[in-house]
Amino acid sequence: MFYDIRNYGLILLELFTCELPYKELTTLQAWNTHHPPDLLLQIKDQDIFSLIADCLNPKLSSRATLTKLEKQLDDIYNDTPENLSKQVAMFTDD
């Protein structure tokens, strides 16, 4: 399960940055790396950053659980309308 959480974090990172994490590494190197990708620093929203960073925590016992992820996602989704509008604006050309 811990690797599923890590992979979920990598997918979120790719979705929010539109870039491939660890693109400079081979698949095997990326799988064995114990540090978050530099791409994580491009995430400016603190809630999204924390969500992804929790998924990518190299210490397995400190990595996010499904219960914690569900809570974080609910908090982000139920954020104030103003903040939600800003998050949606990240994905539009307006």
Image (cartoon, helix red, strand yellow):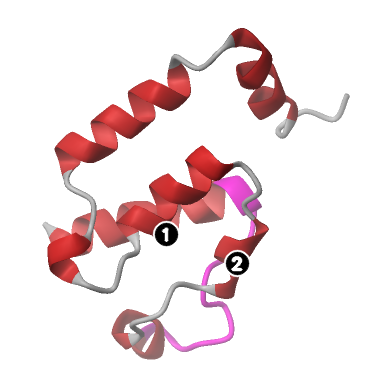
Three-letter amino acid code of the residue under disc 2: Leu
Residue at position x 34%, y 33% in the image: 72
Residue at position x 55%, y 62% in the image: 40
Residue 5 lies in quadrant? bottom left
Q: Secondary structure at mark 1?
A: helix
Q: Where in the figure is residue 88, as x and y percent of width and height?
A: 66, 24
Above or below, 1 against 91 in this view is below
Three-letter amino acid code of the residue under disc 1: Leu
Q: Quadrant of the C terminus?
A: top right
> How many other residues sit within 10 Å of disc 1, few (<14), some (14-19) or many (≥20)?
many
Query: Would you say the magenta stretch is mainly helix, strand or loop?
Result: loop
- In the displayed orientation, state which residue is furthest to the top: 81
Q: Secondary structure at mark 2?
A: helix
Q: On the image, numbered disc 1 is attached to which residue?
A: 10
Residue at position x 61%, y 9% in the image: 81
Q: Where in the figure is residue 47, as x and y percent of width and height?
A: 49, 39
Mark 1 vs mark 2, foreground winner is 2
Residue at position x 25%, y 31% in the image: 70
> How many other residues sit within 10 Å of disc 2, few (<14), some (14-19) or many (≥20)?
some
Q: State which region is magenta.
A: 16-27
Above or below, 46 against 18 in this view is above
Q: On the image, numbered disc 2 is attached to which residue?
A: 39
